[in-house]
Amino acid sequence: MNEKEKMKQGLWYDANNNQELIQERLDAQDLCFELNQVQPSEKEKRNDILLKLLGDLPEHLELLSPFICDYGRNIHLGKNVFINVNCYFMDGADITIGDHVFIGPSCGFYTAQHPLSYPLRNQGLEKALPITIGDHVWIGANVTILPGVTIGSGSVIGAGSVVTQDIEENVLALGIPCHKIKEIQNDYTD
């Protein structure tokens, strides 16, 4: 099994010394750099770059620059997604974002884990676990989402939170570590 296959299966893999993965990250970094240099009003040009970076162009995506990701192709966005400025998607594993999701400025989605043992860390080993965000989720500013986390549909994550474990549907959750504060009644419109 090669390093990319190990990465996709959530196994320990060598991210730092594998030329294929290094090149894929450099390609994504180049596309992110290019995207971040294009004026916001040049929507067609931005969409062309996003298509190259993500592999598809979600319906009604609004992604503000600067934006950074590791691979791009492991990011799966639903329709009507808004991603504010200065977000980072560390997408060694899949990052799946549902429909009608608002992501505040300076949020980080981190799929990578590193060994606690420094001799293993020094070898360049890591593992990547997926992050899943349901539909109709609002993630406030400066939120950190760690590997393997799922946030249920209809939930709101308060600004500055560090999400270390799954968050159920239809709740307000916040804090360090992020935890449920109260349920949200999402059975009506206002």
Image (cartoon, helix red, strand yellow):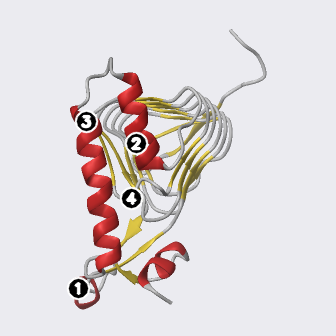
In the image, 118: left or right of 84? Answer: left
Q: Position of residue 74 (x, y in %)?
A: 49, 57
Amino acid type at mark 4: Tyr
Amino acid type at mark 3: Asn
Q: Secondary structure at mark 1?
A: helix
Amino acid type at mark 2: Ser
Amino acid type at mark 1: Tyr
| Label 1 close to label 2 by CB (< 8 Å) | no
Q: Position of residue 113 (x, y in %)?
A: 38, 71
Q: Secondary structure at mark 4?
A: loop
Q: Which residue is mark 2?
A: 161
Q: Distance between the Cα atoms at labels 1 and 4?
A: 25 Å
Q: Report the mark closest to the observer, 1 or 4.
A: 4
Q: Secondary structure at mark 3?
A: helix
The mark nearer the N terminus, 3 or 4, is 3
In the image, 188: left or right of 169? Answer: right
The mark nearer the N terminus, 2 or 3, is 3
Q: Which residue is mark 4?
A: 71
Q: Which residue is mark 3?
A: 36
Q: Distance between the Cα atoms at labels 1 and 2?
A: 28 Å
Residue neighbourhood size for the residue with mark 4, other residues' Cα within 10 Å, grouped as few (<14), some (14–19), many (≥20): many
Q: Report the mark closest to the observer, 4 or 2.
A: 4
Q: Distance between the Cα atoms at labels 4 and 2?
A: 25 Å
Q: Which residue is mark 1?
A: 118
The residue that appears at 52% across and 59% down in the rendered structure is: 94
